[in-house]
Amino acid sequence: MTKVLVLYYSSYGHIETMAQAVAEGVRGAGAVAVIKRVPELVPEHVAEKAGYKRDQPAEIATVAELADYDAIIVGTPTRFGNMASQMKNFFDQCGGLWFEDKLVGKIGSVFTSTGSQHGGQESTILSVHTVLYHLGMIVVGLPYTFKGQGRMDEITGGSPYGASTLADDGKGGDRQPSANELDGARFQGRHVAELAQALSAARLTKAA
């Protein structure tokens, strides 16, 4: 059965919530979804003082296990238009997988969160795409068949590059992912799983 890893980093829980929705979409396509997170780099006392969400149940992923999945969907908040350092640090350890072509031909996809509508949603996703390309992965976004992308009646995340959410309510307060943003995450998870299944089936047919 097709296995999809939802690999994320989340400081305050927004990406964690999106990761769960992505996994729902993967399972809705009949594939196996595994949710894991990358290690935290911020010292415990600093994370506590900053109010980080530290009770996340997802297990910590290892670099070596990435090769065990048919697709990897990456979730990271933005850091000045780029992926979080925790996620970059994890990918920086993939040299062995890169050298042995372990991730070549696997599907990769990305989702994100920002504090505002123009806070780097697209550039953050593209920063991860660059890494996925170097690892030889097949990059998949969020197609316009997800009609929630075209909504103009509310503030919402989402772009053809991947699902996203806005984490700030515009007044300095917390904003959780909206129903439309979660729908986009589920759509992306299902879309990636279906493509991974089709790719696996094609390879089996070719091998036969």
Image: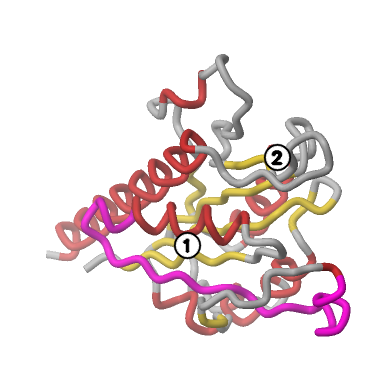
56 over 45 or under it: above or below? above
Question: Is 97 on the left-hand or right-hand side of 128?
Answer: left
Name the residue located 73 percent from the left edge and 31 percent from the top edge.
117
The image shows residue 65 at horizontal and vertical percentages of: 48, 82
The kind of secondary structure element at disc 1 is strand
Coloring scheme used:
secondary structure
179 over 105 or under it: above or below? above
Q: Amino acid at mark 2?
A: Gln
Mark 2 lies on residue: 121
Q: Quadrant of residue 61?
A: bottom right
Mark 1 lies on residue: 72
**Farthest residue, direction top:** 152
Name the residue located 54 percent from the left edge and 78 percent from the top edge.
100
**Distance of label 2 from label 1 (alpha carbons):** 19 Å
Q: Residues within 10 Å of mark 1 (few under 14, many from 20)?
A: many
Q: Quadrant of residue 53?
A: bottom right
Magenta-highlighted residues: 26-49
Q: Which mark is residue 178?
A: none
Camera-side residue of 131 and 98: 131
